[in-house]
Image (tube, rainbow, N blue to C red):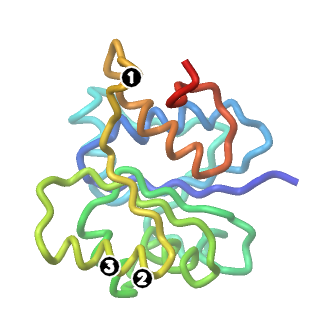
Amino acid sequence: MKRKIAIAITGASGSIYAKRLLEYLEPFRDFEIGLVLSKNAKDVWKLELGEEFQAKPTIRLYDFNDYFAPFASGSSKYEALVIIPCSMGTIGRIAHGISDDLISRAADVMLKEKRKLICVIRDTPLNLIHLKNLVQIAEAGGTIMPAAPAFYSKPQNINQLVDTVVHRILDHLNINIQTFRWGEN
């Protein structure tokens, strides 16, 4: 049976993180990947990456308002949702239980079913409202993972730098990859 993971991309800056995560997941044939993009995600993707968003044939793309997507229900067996990058507007809706689109509904499902919700935030600085919303999600069982790259592996290019964040996400999804490990070199 295939493992099922949902990926959501919002309009926050940081499309490269989503692109790299999808590139890592795409070759895994033992995964079913469901993908949803917010209303602004495609525009930000094009602005930041200089290309139109194109979903790979192995990844199922769902509409932002498709409440019939399997990961919109707790009866589906999606084990995790990664929101990458995750805007503070999305964080606010999740923290307050406002399920007004597929992304916030899927996040609500992950929390209520005690499954993995990984919110890869990229905004800086954070105001008090952001911080309280992040704490609320963490207290409800979500993982807040700032897109804060590590430098101890001495990345040589932007992809290697981005991968320091993406590899941490893959670790949290229990996907075994070869990567720099602290103290192993």
Q: Which residue is mark 2?
A: 99
> Which amino acid type corresponds to the residue marked 2 in the rendered image?
Ser
Q: Rounded to the nearest whole Å, what is the CA distance between mark 1 and mark 2?
A: 33 Å
Q: Nearer the viewer, mark 2 or mark 3?
A: 3
Q: Position of residue 104 (x, y in %)?
A: 42, 74
The residue tagged with tag 3: helix, strand or loop? helix
Instruction: Residue at 42% x, 39% y: name it.
Output: 165
Q: Give the class, few, some or many, for how many residues have Cα within 10 Å of label 1's Cα (few <14, many ≥20).
A: few
Name the element at disc 2.
loop
Q: Position of residue 145 (x, y in %)?
A: 39, 55
Q: Nearer the viewer, mark 1 or mark 2?
A: 1
Instruction: Tell me which amino acid carries mark 1.
Output: Asn
N-terminal of the two: label 1 or label 3? 3
Question: Is mark 2 in CB contact (under 8 Å) with mark 3?
Answer: yes
Residue at 73% x, 80% y: name it: 75
Q: Residue at x 51, y 36 (%)?
A: 167
Which label sits on residue 159?
A: 1
Q: Residue furthest right?
A: 1
At mark 1, the secondary structure is: helix
Q: Is residue 139 above or below residue 134?
A: below
Quadrant position of the C terminus in the picture: top right
**Residue under pointer 3:** 93
* Image vertical order of residue 158 relative to residue 27, above or below: above
Gap in Å between the C-alphas at discs 1 and 3?
31 Å
